[in-house]
Amino acid sequence: MKRNRFRKPYFAVPVGLTLAALASPLSAATFVVDVTDDAVDITPGDGQCRTAANTCTLRAAVQEANALAGDDTIILPVGTITLTLAGPIEDLSASGDLNPRSNIHFEGQGPGVTIIQGAMGESVFRMPVGIASTVSMSGLTITGGTQTNGGGILTQAGTGSLSLYRCVLTNNTATAGHGGAIYSSRPLSLIETTISGNTAFFFGGGVFNLAAATVQNSTISGNASRDSGGGWFNFSGTASLTNVTIAANTADSDANNTGDGGGIFRSGGDVNLNNVLIGDNVDNSGQAPDIAGQFNSQGFNLIENPAGATITGITVSNLLNIDPKLGPLASNGGPTFTHALLPDSPAIDAGSNVLGSDQRGQARPQGLASDIGAFEFTPPTDTDADGVPD
């Protein structure tokens, strides 16, 4: 089914966020997926997303968009789309993973209700090597992908970029390599996104990064790698993190005394930290539980244990060697899970007012200043005029 018309995106882009890399939802063609089945398009390039059963599947929509010029939009339904169509490894989305080969925006109905699930020992999405494609996604969950590198999303070398807005990547696995959730060889943008519960055999349980990356108002939590960088491994490229929470990730998950940086490990490139909270991470070798390597501070970061790191730049406003006092990863409002700041968290009012809202869309600041990390704490209010906050 093809609709050549403008459709407003499900999620409005919040004021104050830099989303230049996010593809415009105004497109040459819009395909509306109407089933959760997995089947191919019968005639890619005819302008009609249509399977043999006369339905529009996600796979068929990708094949059709790939065959057309222009910037296309694929509207996803409520429900779980499980990729079940097995076949040889190829780059045309005819079987296995989905291969965006052109500029495509994937628009879900919310990460809790639109779920794309891998099931065949491949990534869920793979941007093929040498292909120019700018891909953006909003309002969906990617889960169940298993691949050597990039269990959830694998972006291979090529021009273009990948942007995720209000998405969740969870329970994906890099079986023999790096990047449990994302292996990124192209510019990457993560906005108001949660990456949790992913695993990697070697580096980057959450993300393995080799290119420019912008991460804002996002949470990286509960990921694990057998080697270094439980949450994030920066191999090359400049990664700029603003109001990000990196917590409860694990390096050296097999406890063989190899691996550092439970939260984040910098091997190469540059990593800029601005209002970033890094705490409650684990390194089973005991050397660098939260952070390892050299980092550039742009101010107002909280790092619970900086052992194993060299931090340069603006450091006077950083809080080091202090418990961030976080709640568990949970639904705290908004479409994606976050770590709430407990009422006595030192991150409260300790940040700078860079972004106008937090990961949930809550306005910043709620107190004297913005909070450090992805979550903005709302002070209790006095509702009975007794002078004591309720």
Image (tube, rainbow, N blue to C red):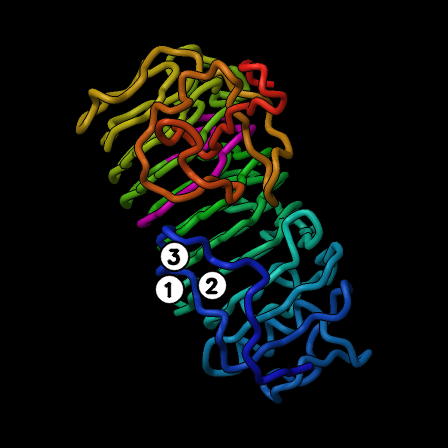
Give how far apart the Cα atoms at labels 1 and 3 are.
Answer: 14 Å
Q: Position of residue 204 (x, y in %)?
A: 45, 35
Residue, disc 1: 160
225 horizontally vs 185: left or right = right
Q: Is residue 225 magenta?
A: yes
Q: Is residue 300 above or below residue 46?
A: above
Out of 273 and 45, give the one closest to the viewer. Answer: 273
The disc at residue 19 is 3
Q: Quadrant of the C terminus?
A: top right
Evaluate whether residue 322 shows in this view: yes
Residue 108's place in the image compared with 344, above or below, is: below
- From the viewer's perspective, tell me whether residue 201 is left or right of residue 288: right
Depth order, front residue of 129/185 = 185
Mark 3 burial class by Cα count in 10 Å: few <14, some 14-19, many 20+: some
| Residue 301: quarter of image | top left
Q: CA distance from mark 2 to mark 1?
A: 8 Å
Indicate the secondary structure of the residue bearing disc 2.
Answer: strand
Q: Tag 3: residue type?
A: Leu
Q: Secondary structure at mark 1?
A: strand
Q: Which residues are magenta?
A: 211-233
Label 3 element class: loop
Q: Earlier in the sequence, mark 2 or mark 1?
A: 2
Whole-Å distance between the Cαs marked 3 and 2? 13 Å
The residue labelled by disc 2 is 135
Residue at 58% across, 44% down: 169
Quarter of the image that includes the N terminus: bottom right
